[in-house]
Image: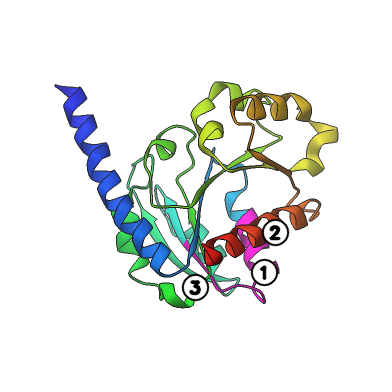
């Protein structure tokens, strides 16, 4: 009896995701769904991105978390608009949650919407939120075999951001191994090593975003 229930949940999510995708397309809005383990640095990456690109783009954030509004407060401190979704123990955001959250934004006056998903490498991948691209975020404080252990995320993502590269001298993490695993799963995956602390590599991430915005507005 569980299989039909799961199928119905995913089908309902897909229908709402299609509504979102149409809404985002009508607004020429680029939507990026950031997915990572807890503590990999999604919020830190957003803080840097929202601050450094605020003169180029109007940006907004849907923040997903189990509890608290801590991350939304950090994001809002950059000047970007943010809406917090607390899942109360749920391991992912779904399209219905995002649809409700974006009603608080003027989508026609926004260039980029970031969805910061709940920290989890499994469930968020399976629930389409109407995004243009999923972005996998991995940090060097995790295992370099994460792409091999959690293949669906890296297979479906358009970009992989490898964060905390400033810690490489102090951790046992093989960048080439992680890169090899990820691109074996997805040959089109953009690999972007960065350090949110030092700023190293962030310009490559920003260039990827700029190109994605340009492509969305011209499509």
- What residue is pinned by disc 1? 53
Residue 105 at x, y percent in the picture = 40, 72
Q: Earlier in the sequence, mark 3 or mark 2?
A: 3
Q: Are marks 1 and 3 in contact (CB under 8 Å)?
A: no
Residue 108 at x, y percent in the picture = 43, 75
Q: Is residue 78 magenta?
A: no
Q: Which residues are magenta?
A: 45-61
Instruction: Kindly state the secondary structure of the residue where label 2 is placed.
Output: helix
Of all residues, the one furthest to the right in this rendering is 169
At horizontal 53% and vertical 26% (from top left) the residue drawn is 151
Instruction: Kindly state the secondary structure of the residue where label 1 is placed.
Output: loop
- What residue is pinned by disc 2? 206
Is 184 left or right of 59, judged from the image as shown? Answer: right
Q: Is residue 148 above or below residue 142?
A: above
- What residue is pinned by disc 3? 110
Is 200 left or right of 3, judged from the image as shown? Answer: right
In which quadrant of the rendered view does residue 165 lie? top right
Task: For label 2, count other residues whose C-alpha is less than 10 Å away and answer few (under 14), some (14-19) or many (20+).
Answer: some
Q: Earlier in the sequence, mark 2 or mark 1?
A: 1
Residue 72 at x, y percent in the picture = 49, 62
Alpha-carbon distance for marks 3 and 2? 17 Å
Alpha-carbon distance for marks 1 and 3? 13 Å
Q: Is residue 192 above or below residue 146?
A: below
Residue 146 at x, y percent in the picture = 60, 26
Instruction: Kindly state the secondary structure of the residue where label 3 is placed.
Output: loop
Residue 71 makes an appearance in the image: yes
At horizontal 58% and vertical 43% (from top left) the residue drawn is 158
Residue 174 makes an appearance in the image: no
């Amino acid at each position: 009896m569980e299989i039909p229930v799961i199928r119905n949940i995913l089908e309902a999510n897909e229908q709402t995701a299609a509504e979102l995708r149409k809404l985002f397309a009508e607004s020429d809005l680029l939507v990026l769904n950031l997915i990572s383990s807890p503590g990999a640095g999604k919020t830190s990456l957003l803080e840097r991105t929202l601050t450094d690109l605020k003169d180029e783009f109007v940006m907004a954030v849907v923040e997903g978390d189990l509890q608290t509004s801590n991350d939304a407060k950090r994001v809002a401190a950059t000047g970007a608009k943010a809406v917090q979704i607390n899942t109360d123990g749920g391991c992912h955001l779904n399209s219905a949650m995002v649809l409700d959250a974006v009603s608080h934004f003027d989508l026609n006056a926004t260039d980029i919407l970031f969805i910061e998903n709940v920290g989890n490498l499994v469930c968020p991948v399976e629930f389409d939120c109407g995004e243009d691209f999923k972005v996998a975020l991995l940090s060097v404080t995790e295992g370099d075999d994460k792409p091999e252990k959690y293949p669906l995320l890296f297979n479906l993502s358009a970009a992989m951001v490898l964060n905390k590269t400033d810690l490489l001298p102090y951790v046992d993490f093989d960048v080439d191994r992680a890169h090899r695993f990820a691109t074996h799963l997805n040959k089109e995956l953009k690999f972007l090593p960065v350090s949110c602390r030092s700023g190293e590599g962030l310009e490559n991430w920003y260039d990827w975003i700029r190109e994605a915005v340009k492509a969305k507005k011209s499509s």
